[in-house]
Amino acid sequence: MLEIGSLAPNFTLPDENNSPVTLSDYLGKKILVYFYPRASTPGCTTQACALRDSKDELTALNVVVLGISPDTPKKLTNFINKQDLNFTLLGDEDHRTCESYGVWQLKKFMGKENMGVVRTSFLIDENGKLEHIFNKFKTKDHHEVVLNYLKSEG
């Protein structure tokens, strides 16, 4: 499990346009890396739209949002266009990045077990270190939990 204060695992993943995005390119800014199970599902849509609507506040706090799921760039593009999202989504189809962050786990749903993304967010500081891990929230209030944390740090 990743620990607060440790260096965030670096990654390069394709965005919705299939262009590579590397975490270390964002040094100097805070980054909210949020992992979600699947684009265009109800909970993921609620969470993404709330972050979309909080973009101005997050930008004012020098925070960049990167969403990561095991989706293809095409699915990410559809999700962004349908929900008018204003931040970058990244596809981790082989779930290697999910594994490096410890969010690819065995999940139980409706009596079935399968591997998938456990919804978790990581706040990475300007130096690339883990500042905070958000793993106890509801999709509808995820943005509020993040903003409350950021405002209490100032």
Image (cartoon, grey):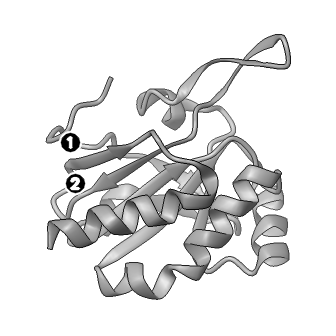
Determine whether 7 is above or below 100 in the image. below
Q: Is residue 149 left or right of residue 117?
A: left
Marks 2 and 1 in Cβ contact (< 8 Å) = yes
Residue 93 seen in this snapshot? yes
Whichever of callouts 2 and 1 sits on the residue coming sooner in the sequence is 1
* Percent coordinates x, y for residue 43 in the rendering: 73, 51
Determine whether 67 is above or below 122 in the image. below
Residue drawn at the location 42% of the way across and 30% of the way down: 100
Residue drawn at the location 75% of the way across and 60% of the way down: 45
Residue that label 2 marks = 128
Quadrant, the C terminus: bottom left
* Percent coordinates x, y for residue 137 in the rendering: 50, 46
Q: CA distance from mark 2 to mark 1?
A: 6 Å
Quadrant, the N terminus: top left
Q: In this rendered view, identify the residue nearer to me: 89 or 111.
A: 111
* Percent coordinates x, y for residue 138 in the rendering: 58, 48
Q: In this rendered view, identify the residue nearer to me: 131 or 127.
A: 131
Task: Tell me where residue 25 sits by quadrant.
Answer: bottom left
Residue drawn at the location 37% of the way across and 69% of the way down: 147
Q: What number is the disc on residue 93?
A: none
Residue that label 1 marks = 7
Question: Element at badge 2?
Answer: loop
Residue drawn at the location 32% of the way across and 55% of the way down: 123
Question: Element at badge 1?
Answer: loop
Near mark 2 (Cα within 10 A), the count class, few <14, some 14-19 or many ≥20, is: many
Q: Mark 1 is on which residue type?
A: Leu
Determine whether 122 is above or below 104 in the image. below
Q: Mark 2 is on which residue type?
A: Gly
